[in-house]
């Protein structure tokens, strides 16, 4: 048998060339408490405006949230900074980062989703934005409620959010790529992802409210001379309702 070469490669990399980057973080409890109080007030106010006609969800209570609501709750700067951090991290990962570049990002819509038994979100993506996100505020323990004998031992996805990137990348026991990813929410979790990514939310049965605060955002990367590099070409405008709360609302 020929003696095998033992010299190591001069360079070895494992890199991510395909598929989007996600961001997730656990928000501090004082911020979660502030958003719970804010959402309680919005949901109980009869003048609060439904956002359901613009959304894919089969959910009764989907209520608009305005920037002024976020400012009043004291969480506006915190959430905007999380979005900016996501943009800068992805810019670094994909070769768009320079210390002198200008990184802009702004939330341009937000809403409360108060989800109950049998309500769900079908597979969809978001338009009019670059980034989509969701903050979980209330998460009931819904696992194991169906108690189906034939499904014992299988994964229970009730109440989960599922992201669908590629069906071909979801082969069992594939170490190279996952095309579908499920997340079981917990209170305080913030997840951010590209707005074009297809996602769905599974229903659950029984008592409890699954409350979250989804939002959309836009971003732009420019040189120090304000020449466009990446992101939103419209100049980071806010064309949606988010900035426009009326005095009587």
Image: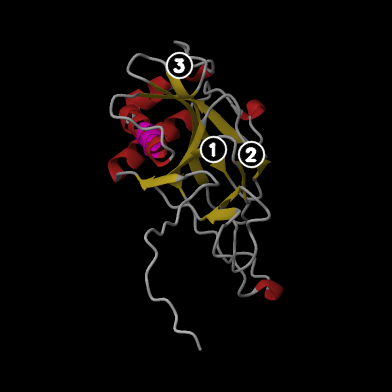
Indicate which disc residue 243 carries: 3
| Disc 1 versus disc 3: nearer the observer | 3
Which of the two labelled residues, at mark 1 and mark 3, occupies the earlier sequence position?
1
The span shown in magenta is 82-89
**Residue lying furthest right in this view?**
150
Could you say which is closer to the camera, residue 133 or residue 46? 133
Report how far apart the C-alphas of labels 1 and 3 lie in the structure: 19 Å
Question: Dot 1, how many residues are within 10 Å of its Cα: few (below 14), some (14-19), or many (20+)?
Answer: many
Q: Measuring 69% from the left and 75% from the top, which residue is drawn there? A: 149
Residue placed under numbered mark 1 in the picture = 113
| Disc 2 versus disc 3: nearer the observer | 3
Which of the two labelled residues, at mark 2 and mark 1, occupies the earlier sequence position?
2
Question: Dot 3, how many residues are within 10 Å of its Cα: few (below 14), some (14-19), or many (20+)?
Answer: some
Up-down relation of residue 121 to residue 109 (above or below): below
Residue 128 appears in the figure: yes
Q: Measuring 34% from the left and 14% from the top, which residue is drawn there? A: 225
Chief secondary structure of the magenta portion = helix
């Amino acid at each position: 048998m020929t003696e095998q070469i033992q010299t190591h490669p001069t360079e070895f990399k494992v890199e991510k060339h395909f598929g989007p980057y996600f961001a997730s973080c656990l928000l501090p409890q004082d911020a979660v408490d502030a958003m719970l109080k804010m959402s309680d007030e919005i949901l109980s106010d009869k003048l609060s405006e439904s956002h359901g006609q613009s959304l894919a969800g089969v959910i009764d209570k989907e209520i608009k949230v305005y920037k002024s609501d976020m400012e009043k709750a004291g969480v506006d700067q915190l959430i905007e900074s999380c979005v900016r951090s996501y943009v800068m991290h992805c810019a670094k990962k994909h070769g768009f980062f320079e210390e002198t570049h200008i990184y802009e990002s702004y939330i341009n819509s937000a809403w409360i989703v108060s989800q109950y038994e049998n309500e769900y979100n079908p597979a969809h993506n978001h338009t009019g934005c670059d980034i989509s996100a969701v903050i979980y505020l209330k998460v009931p323990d819904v696992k194991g409620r169906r108690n189906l004998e034939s499904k014992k031992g299988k994964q229970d996805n009730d109440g989960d959010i599922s992201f669908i990137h590629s069906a071909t990348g979801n082969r069992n026991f594939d170490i190279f790529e996952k095309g579908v990813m499920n997340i079981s929410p917990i209170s305080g979790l913030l997840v951010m992802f590209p707005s074009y990514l297809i996602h769905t939310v599974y229903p659950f049965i029984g008592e409890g409210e699954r409350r979250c605060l989804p939002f959309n955002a836009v971003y732009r990367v420019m040189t120090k001379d304000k020449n466009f590099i990446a992101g939103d070409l419209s100049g980071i405008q806010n064309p949606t309702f988010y900035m426009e709360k009326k005095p009587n609302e």
